[in-house]
Amino acid sequence: MNASAFIGQDAAWREWSLALQSDRLHHAWLLAGAKGLGKGGFALAAACELVREGGAPVDPASHPDIHVLSHLPATDDEAKKKVDGKPYQTKRNITVDQIRGMIRRLSTKPTMGSRRAIVIDPADDLEKGAVNALLKALEEPPAGTFFLLIAHQPGRLLPTVRSRCRVLRFAPLGPDELAAVLRRDHPEADAALREAAVAAADGSPGLALAVVEHDLARIHALMMRILHLGDDDLRARGELADAMGARPSRDRQLAVLELARATLASQLREASPHRQAALIEAHSTLTRLSAQAPTYNFDAGLLILEIGGLLASAAMPRDAARHP
């Protein structure tokens, strides 16, 4: 793995690689940046380099010294769906039992070499008890154990956790870098869709890919229309519901929620202080909905109408819309 695999994040990979070659590699790293910047893939690639012995290839899914802690299936039925390779719902948090189980494994030495990697994705979603349990491990890490904590919102972590980590920051990508990601991962997509995805993504390759995969260009255009012109007659919200579809998949719903959040965020830079407050309030509500969506079974029609209503609540004042 090298920097070319992470378009736009070569500086982060270079920093990690230089640290890996040093004699005193820090035991805990905080991979910080907005959701969708590729931090999860970066963490797995970094873990592979960390545990690699010689030139042997490493599979992060099966290597005994790479441990990934993320959201578990919400129920036994959802766990069966996961085993069958089907979409499944997850718990809202990474639990204290998961962290305690990981700590028990740390009482033994690494299996295949001198190092092991613990990836927590995302550390933002650790239960309070899980954070306290993790803190103890960060304070006294066993020899050869290294932590890679992924954080979409580092401010949600305790200062005592952040202070024990070396921060590796991930920056939003520029338009050319986003276009390169889309050409690499979706060469079959037409140029117009790729261009719309770049415009909608606000620097996030994960969101740009989702726009292409779920064909969300029309939905983004409707969101922008509501934000600029409002939706007093509810017509745009009706069009949003049509564009969403009658039975959208859970992944499509999550992608639309993330798109709405990014669309609101993209307006902040040029907004007046009064409108910024409305944008932030709508964004906060969407963030809460996004956290609930993987667990709760929302009605898709009501969800898209709720999204449209939140966008309308943050719409540009009419005078400003007429006179940009």
Image (cartoon, grey):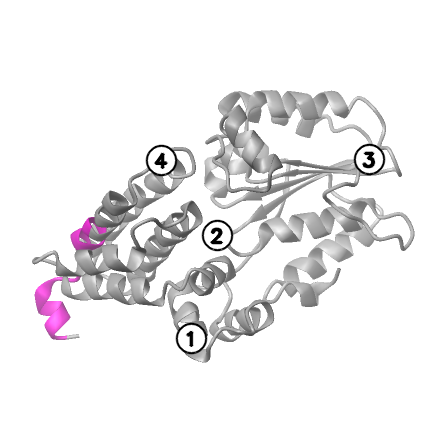
Disc 2 marks which residue? 34
The label nearer to you, 4 versus 1, is 4
Label whose residue precedes the other's in the sequence (2 or 1)? 2
The reply to whether callout 3 and callout 2 are in contact (CB within 8 Å) is no
Q: Measuring from the top left, give residue 14's x and y in whole percent.
A: 71, 61
Label whose residue precedes the other's in the sequence (4 or 3)? 3
Q: CA distance from mark 2 to mark 4?
A: 26 Å
Label whose residue precedes the other's in the sequence (2 or 4)? 2
Q: Residue at point 9% right, 65% down?
A: 318
Disc 1 marks which residue? 195
Q: Measuring from the top left, give residue 21's x and y in whole percent.
A: 83, 53
Q: Which residues are magenta?
A: 309-323
State whether residue 243 is above or below residue 158.
below
Q: Residues within 10 Å of mark 3 (few under 14, many from 20)?
A: some
Callout 3: SS: loop
The label nearer to you, 4 versus 3, is 4
Disc 3 marks which residue? 144
What is the number of the mark on residue 2?
Answer: none
Label whose residue precedes the other's in the sequence (3 or 2)? 2
Q: Quadrant of the C terminus?
A: bottom left
Q: Residues within 10 Å of mark 1 (few under 14, many from 20)?
A: some
Residue 317, quarter of the rendered image: bottom left
Q: Nearer the viewer, residue 244 or 137?
A: 244
Q: Amino acid at mark 4?
A: Asn
Let me know if residue 220 appears in the view. yes
Let me know if residue 133 appears in the view. no
What is the number of the mark on residue 297?
Answer: 4
Q: Quadrant of the N terminus?
A: bottom right
Q: CA distance from mark 2 to mark 1?
A: 21 Å
State whether residue 33 is above or below residue 173.
above
